[in-house]
Amino acid sequence: MPKVTTSHLRQLLDSRAEQPVLYIDPESGQLDIWADALVHHASVVLTREELVDALGDDFSDGDADDYLAIVQDAADEAASAG
């Protein structure tokens, strides 16, 4: 199972893709970021909108630490579904 890190959250926040999502790539099994419309829904771990709603658009690593456990649960579930 891929491990979600603060770096993934920052990449999602900084992505230039339209409505970016953090998802599990079904071919590699790794976490990646891409436009929501181009990703199978069951592979999605987190949307940028969900991230901003939870932590805002300028969060510290400390703020992210508690949230990472929630996102990791979603990643594990998406990996199992794939």
Image (cartoon, rainbow, N blue to C red):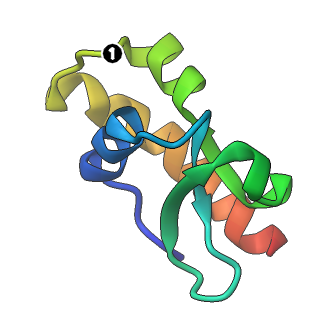
| Residue at image point 76% right, 72% down | 80
Q: Is residue 70 left or right of residue 16?
A: right
How far across and how far down the image is residue 27, in percent? 66, 88
Q: Quadrant of the N terminus?
A: bottom right
Dot 1 falls on a residue whose secondary structure is loop
Q: Quadrant of residue 62?
A: top left
Q: Residue 43: percent from the left, percent from the top? A: 74, 61
Q: Amino acid at mark 1?
A: Asp
| Residue 63 percent across, percent down from the top left | 25, 22
The residue positioned 58% from the left and 23% from the top of the image is 50
Residue positioned 52% across, 12% down in the render? 53
| Image label count | 1
Q: Residue furthest bottom?
A: 27
Q: Residues within 10 Å of mark 1 (few under 14, many from 20)?
A: some
- Quadrant where the C terminus sits is bottom right
Given residues 25 and 35, the one toward you in this image is: 35
Q: For the point 61% across and 58% down, which residue is it?
A: 23
64 lies above or below 63 = below
Disc 1 target residue:
57
Apparent side of residue 53 relative to residue 44 in the rendered image (left or right): left
Residue 19: x and y, percent? 61, 33
Residue placed most toward the observer, 26 or 73: 26
Above/below status of 46 relative to 58: below
